[in-house]
Amino acid sequence: MIAAKNITKTFGKLKALNDISVSFNRGACIALLGPNGCGKTTLIKSILGMVVPDSGTIEFDGQSIGKQWLYRGQIGYMPQIGRYPENMTIANVIEMMKDIRKECQGHLDEELIESFDLHALMNKKMHTLSGGTRQKVSACLAFLFNPDVLILDEPTAGLDPVSSEKLKRKIILEKEKGKLILITSHVLSELDDLITDVFYMQDGRLIFYKKLSALMQATGEEKLAKAIAKIMIA
């Protein structure tokens, strides 16, 4: 569904992506992992068309994304830090996004709005919200337009335990529908029950890309954090 071929991107002397080639397919929930500055965010932004690689190509459903934008309508993106007009209410922000993404409104998915009980907060202005509530708004917007692909950057950061579990259940439901989900997190324990594959980067390079089951079998571990530690220390 998404295929990157020999992607390279530099920022000054920093090579953020170094000849990355990978395919991400429907029905997978893939953890994009690696230390800070490894290139995960640059890869995500390249897929979204927010960063243009120096070389290589990215295809979405077999079509190059170069100079294209309509494919983004099939992607729901939850940034690590959502930035919204501070004087707008939650309701204003949601309506603004509906207006921007008119072509994506065949079936709106408001399950998370209900689950997070955001209807009770719709008249709250964004500048009054806690970090966790902002995160809930970002999650709701990512899922709202029923996209084929979800890109979730540290999705549970700032969420209380109950809300975190609600979001994880929603991710599992969408995975079971055959959607492609790319997810980053530094809290690896939260990924154990979610992911099917592990994509690990370091210094702009792909270190390994494995099925979670294969990684566990190869390391003899039952937890993702321990499995990655063992494979990286070896």
Image (cartoon, grey):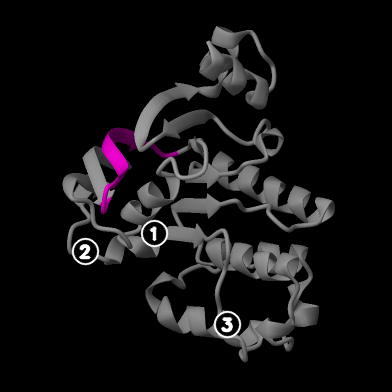
Q: Secondary structure at mark 2?
A: loop
Viewed as shown, does residue 165 lie left or right of 213?
right
Residue 77 is at least partly visible in this image = yes
The one of 8 and 163 positioned closer to us in this rendering: 8
Residue type indicated by callout 3: Val
Residue, disc 2: 68
Mark before the other along the chain sequence, 3 or 2: 2
Residue, disc 1: 74
Q: Residue furthest front?
A: 13
Q: Categorize mark 2 by other alpha carbons within 10 Å: few (<14), some (14-19), many (20+).
A: few
Q: Secondary structure at mark 1?
A: helix
Q: Residue at x 43, y 44 (%)?
A: 40
Question: Which residues make up the magenta segment?
Answer: 11-26
Q: Main secondary structure of the magenta part?
A: strand
Write down the quadrant of residue 69 in the picture: bottom left
Q: Categorize mark 3 by other alpha carbons within 10 Å: few (<14), some (14-19), many (20+).
A: many
Residue, disc 3: 93
